[in-house]
Amino acid sequence: MNDAAISPDSPSLLKVHTQVGNTVVKLTGNWTLRNLAMAPLLRHKLEKLAKDEAMQWDMEGIEVLDSGTALILWRDWGQRMPASLRIRPEHERLFERWQAQEIAEPEPEDPGSVLLFHYLQRTIGSFWGQLLDLIMLLGQLALDIVFLFRRPRAVPWPEISGTIYEAGVRALGITALVGFLIGIVLSYLSALQLKIFGAEIYIIDILGLSVIRELGPLLAAILVAGRSGSAMTAQIGIMRVTEELDALSAMGISHSLRLILPKVTALAISMPLLSVWTSAMALIGGMVSAQNTLDISYQQFFLKLPDVVPLLNVFIGLGKSVVFGLMIALIACHFGFRIEPNTESLGNETTNSVVAAITVVIMIDAVFAILFMNVGMP
């Protein structure tokens, strides 16, 4: 059985029967992937003959043998060399690399249910691992506070004041704009419904309770999480990339005392103030809209607001804001220290930080709403 060669360089296969009754397969020509792809029948015959373990092989007539074709022969032989093989030394070296390492076969694909189970298992494991890291971060923060009570001179005032300026003072503009617009939208939409029932005066109740108790602290926290939280995460990540964290460790400077504590303290101080500022701007926006749509004067709005909104709602809003600031700073620092020294990890962890912070803020707000359901209501 001989495959006619198209050219002298084409691969050829000849099956020869010897006088002693043995069968020898002689390979000649240039055995390359390109030539083999142009001879599909030859490839089929080669695979069929390779299944016979008693077959003898003579490959000394091969002029050119590339590693791809050597791999095909290796797999056709069942990933082992034939018992009787004649081959040139330079070609034999191509098979030595396959003999030295086991070729990993592709694993069968798992069904969809198994993949889903593994995904859920990894997600839950990652969640609990990050929750444990966050608790450890909170514990380290408590130890730093105890340390600073014993050594007040070690309080990092410059870092705290700088973070208050960056996260609080520089956020006044965006929080004022968003609060003002939200107040206008809420007042306008509420006015459309109150006009139907002739209860225009209750616009003050709706704006007062919703803004001071819920929307003001929540809007401020979401804006700070997206603006300052991402900046804190990226800052720590850049310090990781530039090896500044390693330099601090080499100098014996505590990461938690110089990086985490100032950010947590600054946001715990800034968030209640930003909450009051955002609520005030939202009430001003609602007041302007109410005056234009419902003809409720500014004086009437100011005089009735303290009567319909008990003072306890202000303290509830401030208390929530302190917790919001604490969690935003902790989450930002947590994801910042998870960043690896590469730009891809920097972007991914910064995104995760913002998403996690906003999600936690909304969850905490829901918990406060349930716990203080009947508190502070007129």
Image (tube, rainbow, N blue to C red):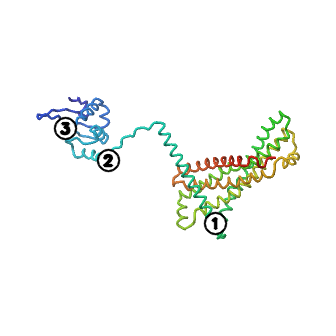
Report the amino acid beneath label 2.
Gln
Precedes in sequence: disc 3 or disc 1: 3
Of residues 6 and 342, the one nearer the viewer is 342
Q: Which mark is residue 41?
A: none
Residue bearing mark 3: 56
The residue at 21%/39% (across/down) is 59
Q: Which mark is residue 101?
A: 2
Residue 64, given in percent of the width and then of the height, sits at 26, 40
Marks 2/1: CA distance? 58 Å
Precedes in sequence: disc 2 or disc 1: 2
Mark 2 or mark 1: which is in front? 1
Left/right of residue 136 with respect to residue 3 in the rendered view: right
Residue 327, given in percent of the width and then of the height, sits at 64, 54
The residue at 48%/40% (across/down) is 115
Of residues 311 and 80, the one nearer the viewer is 311
- The crowding category of the residue bearing disc 1, from other C-alpha atoms within 10 Å (few below 14, some 14 to 19, many at least 20), is few
Residue bearing mark 1: 146
- The crowding category of the residue bearing disc 2, from other C-alpha atoms within 10 Å (few below 14, some 14 to 19, many at least 20), is few
Marks 3/1: CA distance? 82 Å
Left/right of residue 236 with respect to residue 89 in the rendered view: right
Report the amino acid beneath label 1.
Val
Residue 266, given in percent of the width and then of the height, sits at 68, 59
